[in-house]
Amino acid sequence: MSERVYTAIIVDDEDLARAVVQEHLAGHPEITVVASCGNGFEAVKAAAEHKPDLLFLDIQMPKLTGFEVLELLDPQPTVVFITAYDQHALKAFEVHAVDYLLKPFNAERFEEALVRAKARCDQGQPMGPQPMELSAAARSDWPLDRLVVKDGTKVTLIPLARLDYVQAQDDYVLLKTPEKSHLKQQTISNLETRLDPKRFLRIHRSFIIQLDRLARLEQTPSESWVAVLQDGTRLPVSKSGYARLKSVLDAGAV
Amino acid sequence: MNPLLGSRAALGTYLLGWIPIGGLLVFVALGQHWRLVEALVFTAPLCLGGAFLFLSSWYLCKALPLRTATLGSHGVAWILAALIMANLWAGGGLALAWALGQVPMLSGIYFKARVAGSFLVAVGAVVYLAVLTLHYLMDAVARGKLSEAREAEFRILAQDAELRALRAQLNPHFLFNSLNSISALTTLDPAKARGMCILLSDFLRGSLRLGEKKLVSLAEEVDLLKSYLAIEQIRFGSRLQVQWEIDPRTQAEPIPALLLQPLVENAIKHGIAGLTEGGVVRIAARRLGPVLEVQVENPVDEDTPVVHGLGLGLRQVRSRLQMRFGERMRFEAGVVDGQHRVHMVFPAETPDVPTPDEVQK
């Protein structure tokens, strides 16, 4: 037995489901439950505050799914998913979850998950994926219809329909909506792979636009192209971006 | 296009039908001292031309469908059309006779044809009306086939819905989540755990029983919904509230079994479960004279992208109603001001008796 104390947060939208986990943990004095959250927003806030070692995480919840919660956490805690749905198991392991418990589970199964989770914590290194990896995994079975952004402790959901364009800024992307811009830690190439290519197009190394925001294309005196959006924003179009844009527009015009 | 022109067999049969008409014309002509050769060279092209000319009655049949018929409006149009077409035909006949008369051997034919002019108009009008009737008949047969096909499609959808409703009682996630709640309650509150086992049994037994029937009374369906919602209320705690507005006059009304169950399940799955604070599921049924109005309403999360069109569950509920009531029902579903509402109206089958309260008043 190690002498170490582990902090944990339980996240589930059902009171009784949280109570079960709490009860199983009661026999483990080395585990301290620092928070018990009923939805994804609370979980993100609590995790930012407590930086727990362990996260017992439901997947289907109001507001944010378990995967979206994980995407917003830095550092990544060791995660045990607990859900009634078995179809997310593959993805859970893609995001390096240490275990995946199916409701209802017995005490032995819970102990097994706990032993693994503690071992992972003891290894000391952050085994959690980088946000980039996480998103790549999320692509496999999670059609993206919104983006989650964390600004301090505030979590914002951006429906893709509100997104005008995306601008790369080193390891971050600037997400531009009519109201304001949001900064998210993700590379533009990674975000590009998660977006529907019918709606979004990479027009330049640093820019992705939502196609229906495009008002017109203009040629500059130096023979390069500029995309003019409906709100008047002018964005540079690279040579390969122009070729992509043209093939999409030609196909759309038929 | 005219269905008679669509198939060689149909056109052949139609043209064969003109042979007796031609025979009759020849017979009459011989009686009027036409020579046989005159009668034959005149009648054959005349009948062939008439056969194609009268196919135009198809347009009239399409323009004036029998469904909208009143003898006044349609009858006048039919007779007018018959007279016009018959005159056209007879006129064509005279032109034909004039052309034939240029041949020395048939020089008398134009005069004889002019004498027969009004007779031709009369025959033409009668034949035109017969061809028109034929078109109406064919249209009715085709329409019958189409509605049979549509009915079969409804039936398949409705059967799908019935299968799905049966499966819904065994919705695995509902069962797993309920069992997880029971597992939590066994130590927290053993009496409540037992209560939930009993509720779950009641619900499963009830849905099996209802699933075997085609029609159940609204009261039976409501009882089943009550046990379902009682289970979900244990799971969701204070997040799920239920508001019942069931008019006592609707209790005995027969409805397709498990019609409302998928709607209430949707209200939880796509409504309450997505809301941090939860909300109220409202289930209302009332009698409005000859019809029954049923509504299921629940709040939805505004951040969740709105799904356009009806989901499979809602489409199936609609097709089950359509199957039973045809055009005499209304089904609407959609989100207004953060509330998802399903609104159904269909004919009531029990007599509309006033409630005891109303009698006292």
Image (spheres, helix red, strand yellow):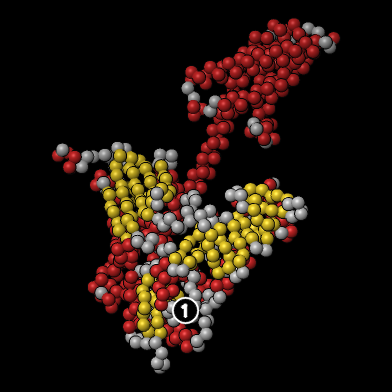
What residue is rendered at 42% in x and 67% in y? A41
| Element type at mark 1 | loop
What residue is rendered at 37% in x and 84% in y? A31
What residue is rendered at 29% in x and 42% in y? B287
Q: Quadrant of the N terminus of chain A?
A: bottom left
Where, by quadrant of the figure, is residue B226 drawn?
A: bottom left
The one of B141 and A15 positioned closer to us in this rendering: A15
Identify residue for label 1. Answer: A77
Where, by quadrant of the figure, is residue A3 drawn?
A: bottom left
Q: Position of residue A244 (x, y in %)?
A: 70, 57
The one of B300 and B258 positioned closer to us in this rendering: B300
The one of B91 and B204 positioned closer to us in this rendering: B204
What residue is rendered at 64% in x and 17% in y? B85
In this image, A5 relative to A195: left or right? left
Q: Residue A163, relative to residue A93: is it above or below?
A: above
User: Please, what is the three-letter code of the amino acid marked with disc 1?
Assistant: Pro
Q: Position of residue B296 (x, y in %)?
A: 35, 51
Q: What's the chain of the residue with tag 1?
A: A
Q: Position of residue B182 (x, y in %)?
A: 32, 72
Q: Is residue A46 visible?
A: yes
Q: Residue B227, relative to residue B115: is it above or below?
A: below
